[in-house]
Amino acid sequence: MTLPAVPTEVRTPRLLLRAPSPEDAPALHAAVQTSLPELRRWMVWAQEPPDLPGTVENLREVAVRFETRENLRYHVWNAEGTELVGSSGYHALDWRVPKGEIGYWISTAHAGRGYATEVARALTDLGLRPPGEGGLGFRRIEIRADARNDRSARIPRALGYTLDATLVNDAVAADDPGQLRDTLVFSVTR
């Protein structure tokens, strides 16, 4: 199976999405640390985030998975590429279909400016565009959100995704493993 070329950079009107690099570790670590109060509510990985050396190691692994097309994470930067705004990308890839799931988080310092919607729109467009036109040729893209996370769930709705399902008692709550949560599954297809 021949996989499509994947751009290492994607630009939006206000942002630069760039493939991860170990050199991003200080900026990523700082953005995560300052955003932990918000991230911990929704993200399992934020319950015990890595220290700076752990972040460097994680980024080495993530860069390899980007190159092999196993996981396509992008770091979201301001347009000049000087300040980390958040992270996004395609996860749960299945190139046989092909399909992927878009995930995102925006640092607290940049929240509320529409950046997550802008990023998800750009990744949706790139994902659905045929490879012959510079896209990835996905036939299906999903966005999943904790049913309690209204801000996150607004994004796929704003982009014209369809709510396919509400998975009841689908996972444990990120911030309280003693509680179950429901997961909203949105999709767009081509």
Image (spheres, helix red, strand yellow):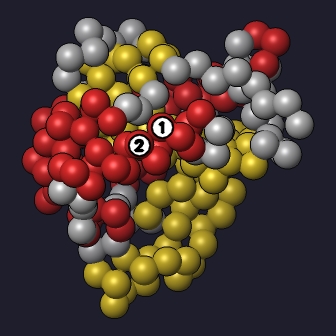
- Asked if marks 1 and 2 touch (Cβ < 8 Å), the reply is yes
Q: Quadrant of the C terminus?
A: top right
Q: Is residue 92 left or right of residue 77?
A: right
| Label 2 sits on residue | 60
- For the question of whether residue 165 can be seen, the reply is yes
Q: Is residue 95 above or below residue 116?
A: below
Q: Is residue 133 above or below residue 21?
A: above
- For the question of whether residue 39 can be seen, the reply is no
Residue type (three-letter) at the residue carrying disc 1: Ala
Q: Quadrant of the N terminus?
A: top right
Q: Is residue 47 left or right of residue 70?
A: left
Q: Is residue 46 above or below residue 137?
A: below
| Label 1 sits on residue | 63
Identify which residue is drawn at 47% across, 44% down.
Answer: 62
Identify which residue is drawn at 34% across, 90% down.
Answer: 178
* Residue nearest the observer in this picture, 77 or 108: 77
Q: Disc 1 versus disc 2: distance between alpha carbons?
A: 5 Å
Q: Position of residue 185 (x, y in %)?
A: 60, 58
Density class for disc 2 (Cα within 10 Å; few <14, some 14-19, many ≥20) is some
